[in-house]
Amino acid sequence: MLINCVAYQEGKKLCDISVEAISDYLALPNCFVWVALADPQPGELATMKEEFGLHELAVEDALRGNQRPKIEEYGDSLFAVVRMVELNGDELVLGELDVFVGPNYVLSARNNATKGFLGVRARAEREPHLLTMGSAFVLYAVMDAVVDRYFPVVDMLESELEKIEDRIFTEGSQSRDNIERLYELKRKVMQLRHAVVPLIDQVGKLYGGRVPPGFEHTQEYFRDIHDHLYRIQSTLDTMRDTIATAIQVHLSMVAIEAGEVNKRLAAWAAIFAVLTAFAGIYGMNFEFMPELKWRFGYPVAIIAMASVCGYLYYRFKKSGWL
């Protein structure tokens, strides 16, 4: 679906144009065209391929989707794939942004993403001196918007981790529930990390050393994106290590609780073993047994059993087993 198609000249917006008029404006001096698509159909991309002269391999990747974040050069054009991550409640929704960049055009196509880039376009149009940098600055503005949307996701994941850590040390918390939440959180962290880490190396191609044609004056902007991505990666790595530690701590606490239960069971088993031994011996009903005919035999046996069991209970209680 076509969102907008706008022509710019010397950093200023000329007008909204039709798809058929793209080639006419591309021929104008100091002019570039910025087109935005949402969930494009194969026919739409085929039309854009003809209008902009897009490389067939880049179009094929855009049609296939689910690409690893990357930035590839095709002659004097560039093809960038960026993973979009959005929050839907506590769930992460993964989308994809494909950007085709040429000397005088920018074509962005987002898939499975609800948030567009109208705010990015409005911001760029308010800064015509930056738009004079052309399509390279537009690529920066779009990528910067995507990366900025990672930060609320990171904040949400950190808050969720803190809540789970508090639950681990709370009495009565369900061990299975905590483990499931930790593994679910780990899955979300890895999803975001898979979007961030490959992009770090790719953005590094756009500043420092040899950069693609047209990106000579935007290197500091892409370095800023690189710094943001590196900071997010550091946070995610710390969270991943913390989650692994939390899982180990939680399992250790479960083992400790199980050990406490086993100690109590063993203590009570030892106490009842004494009663069982006394009852077993005096329940054999042999005719010639000591004190069998004695008048005080029964109460003495009961007192002896109670005394031994009481002593064992005292010793187990003192040692912390009961």
Image (cartoon, helix red, strand yellow):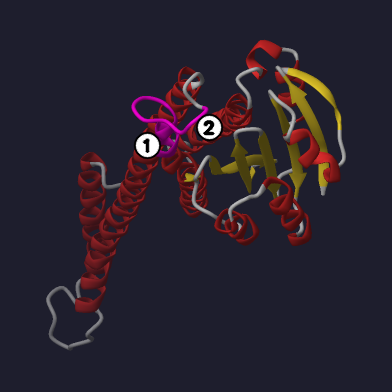
Residue 157 coordinates in the image, percent (x, y): 53, 35
As for residue 212 lying within the magenta part, the answer is yes
277 lies left or right of 123: left
Is residue 312 placed above or below 198 in the rendered structure?
A: below
As for residue 314 lying within the magenta part, the answer is no
Which residue in the protein does label 1 denote?
A: 237
For label 1, count other residues whose C-alpha is less than 10 Å away and answer few (under 14), some (14-19) or many (20+): some
**Circle number at residue 93:** none
Residue 55 coordinates in the image, percent (x, y): 58, 53
148 lies left or right of 170: right
Q: Quadrant of residue 32?
A: top right
Question: What is the magenta range?
Answer: 200-214
Q: In which quarter of the image is residue 297?
A: bottom left
Is residue 205 placed above or below 316 in the rendered structure?
A: above
Residue 167 coordinates in the image, percent (x, y): 49, 38
3 vs 19, nearest the viewer: 19
Q: What residue type is labelled 2?
A: Val
How far apart are labels 2 and 1 at the CA level?
11 Å
**Residue drawn at the location 62% of the way across and 29% of the way down:** 135
- Assign a secondary structure to mark 2: helix
Which residue in the protein does label 2 denote?
A: 154
- Sequence order check: which comes first, mark 2 or mark 1? 2
Whether residues under marks 2 and 1 lie with C-beta atoms below 8 angstroms apart, the answer is: no
140 vs 58, nearest the viewer: 58
Residue 16 appears in the figure: yes
- Assign a secondary structure to mark 1: helix
Q: What residue type is labelled 1?
A: Asp
